[in-house]
Image (cartoon, helix red, strand yellow):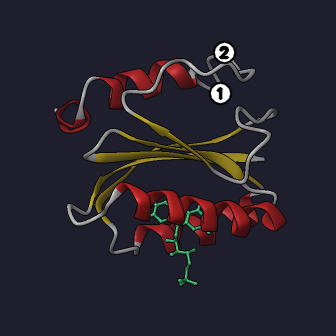
Amino acid sequence: MHRVVYFSNANLDLTFSAIEAMVAKAAERNRPLQVSGALHYNGHNFLQILEGPHQALTPLYLQIRKDLRHSGVVKLAHMRISTRSYPDWGMRLYCGAPKRVGAPLETTSREGDLPTMIDAFFGLGHGAAFA
Ligand SMILES: Cc1cc2nc3c(=O)[nH]c(=O)nc-3n(C[C@H](O)[C@H](O)[C@H](O)COP(=O)(O)O)c2cc1C
């Protein structure tokens, strides 16, 4: 199983209800692919964590990259994982600078510290990712 994490700039025209609808649709599409994850949104940027089988994640990420609802997609991580950090949802939306999630998270250095990565790239604002 793999995890892909990316950062992007949300299209300025995107309303919150449009994002909610997009995530609901994404969740429906992800479940049969055994893909789960989280989409963080701070009003300007997305940080998405996609977890699932490699053969599902790769085409999905390429499809998401092309989506005109965001731009400047930068992949932050692509790693092999043994446990999902977001096991229960096809896709879950978090708004605002994300707090540390309660889900079980791997902390081994090989798999990375996901909350720290989210804080570093997202919690400090969109400038931080490009600093
Ligand atoms: C920030 C962002 C996150 C997205 N996340 C997902 C996702 O997790 N799963 C998914 O199927 N589509 C997701 N999408 C939508 C896809 O880019 C694409 O629109 C969707 O897969 C339908 O593709 P289609 O309209 O070509 O059939 C996301 C789009 C954006 C802008």
Q: Which image quadrant is residue 81 in?
A: top right
Q: Amino acid at mark 2?
A: Thr
Q: Which mark is residue 111?
A: 1
Q: Quadrant of the C terminus?
A: top left
Q: Is mark 1 within 8 Å of ligand 1?
A: no
Query: Residue 117, how many percent across, how many down?
Result: 45, 25
In depth, the one of 87 and 4 nearer the eye is 87
Residue 40: give x, y in percent of width and height.
46, 41
Judged from this view, the residue extending furthest toward the front is 17
Crowding at mark 1 (Cα within 10 Å: few <14, some 14-19, many 20+): some
- Asked if the residue under mark 2 is in contact with the one under mark 1, i.e. CB atoms within 8 Å, the reply is yes
Residue 108 higher or lower than 75, as above or below: above
Residue at (79, 39) in percent of width and height? 87
Q: Residue at x 45, y 28 (%)?
A: 118
Q: Which residue is rendered at x = 50% and y = 57% of the image? A: 20
92 in relation to 98, above or below? below
Secondary structure at badge 1 equals loop
The answer to whether residue 90 is left or right of residue 126 is right
User: Where residue 41 sits in the image (x, y, percent)?
Assistant: 39, 43
The answer to whether any part of residue 51 appears in the image is no
Residue, disc 2: 107
* Image location (x, y in percent) of residue 33: 79, 65
Reply above or below: 60 against 36. below
Return the mark for residue 35.
none
| Three-letter amino acid code of the residue under disc 1 | Glu
Front position in the image: 39 or 111: 39
Report how far apart the C-alphas of labels 1 and 2 lie in the structure: 7 Å
Q: Is residue 10 left or right of residue 29?
A: left
Residue closer to the observer: 119 or 39: 39
Q: Is residue 123 left or right of residue 29?
A: left
